[in-house]
Image: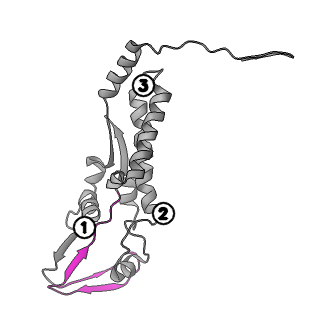
Amino acid sequence: MAVNDTVCRIEIKERDTSSNALKKFYKNLDKHNVTVGIHKEEGAKQVGNNGFTLIQNACIQEFGSTQTVQKTRRFKSPLTGKWFTIKKGTELNIPPRVFVRIFNDKKEKQDLTEAFKNQIGIYQKSNDAEAVYDGVGYLAKWRMRERIDSKKIKPKNAEMTKEYKGSNTPLYMTGELYFGIESKVH
């Protein structure tokens, strides 16, 4: 844009918007994808006794679980120092707390689609498909984490869980699950 005392002129320079350039860009997009959630490396991390892993915990939290205690257990919370006893035969019900499958929600889908379109607009000229997916993955990762941060996760914790953790924030105790959520471009 050139400006002097009497004239304001805007010049639009051509860029390559030919069908061949677009085909090349979209072909490059097809070569990549992004995954968001708890990946194999993060998921393999041990988070409890007896070989319990982060991915096992994430799956139980995401989909819910019911189990019956096989023998009476007594244990101490490392966070609050309180002792707890769960008697043999007690049924423990962990309800599903969706934090990964949030893009089943219509509004979340629309936001993600809009972000994808915006990223295409930004990186089309440079033909950088990986950057498109990196941007979309970044948004998705932070949307999942934001669900935990904003305390939108329902239902709330059981009374014993609140006493054990010393808080009522579902899915957040040590931060391992929260920070285990990552995006990866392939």
Q: Is residue 82 magenta?
A: yes
Residue 122 is labelled as: none
How dense is the environment of label 3, judged by Cα within 10 Å: few (below 14), some, or many (20 and up)?
Answer: some
Q: Which mark is residue 64?
A: 1
Figure label count: 3
Answer above or below: position of 70 versus 170: below
The kind of residue tagged 1 is Gly
Disc 3 marks which residue?
A: 128
Picture coordinates of residue 31 (x, y %)?
29, 27
Along the polypeptide, which appears first: circle 1 or circle 2?
A: 1
Q: What's the CA distance linking mark 1 and mark 2?
A: 21 Å
Q: Marks 3/2: CA distance? A: 33 Å
As displayed, is residue 8 above or below residue 75? above
Distance between mark 3 and mark 1 Cα atoms: 39 Å
* Amino acid, disc 3: Asp
Residue at the image point whose x is 14% and y is 85% from the top: 89
Question: How would you rate the neighbour count of disc 1 (Cα within 10 Å): few for under 14, some for 14-19, many for 20 or more?
Answer: some
* Residue at point 33%, 52% (across, down): 104
Task: Give whichever of discs 3 and 2 has the lower sequence position.
Answer: 3
Rendering coords of residue 106 (x, y %):
38, 51
Q: Residue furthest right?
A: 5
Question: Residue drawn at (37%, 59%), measured in percent from left and top?
Answer: 176
Q: CB of mark 1 within 8 Å of CB of mark 2?
A: no
- Given residues 59 and 52, the one toward you in this image is 59
Residue of label 2? 150
Q: Provide the secondary structure element on which disc 1 rests.
A: loop
Q: Nearer the viewer, residue 135 or 57?
A: 135
The correct choice, above or below, for 127 with respect to 110 in the image is above
Taking the spot 27% from the left edge, 63% from the top edge, the residue there is 57
Magenta range = 72-99
Left or right of 48 on screen, residue 15: right
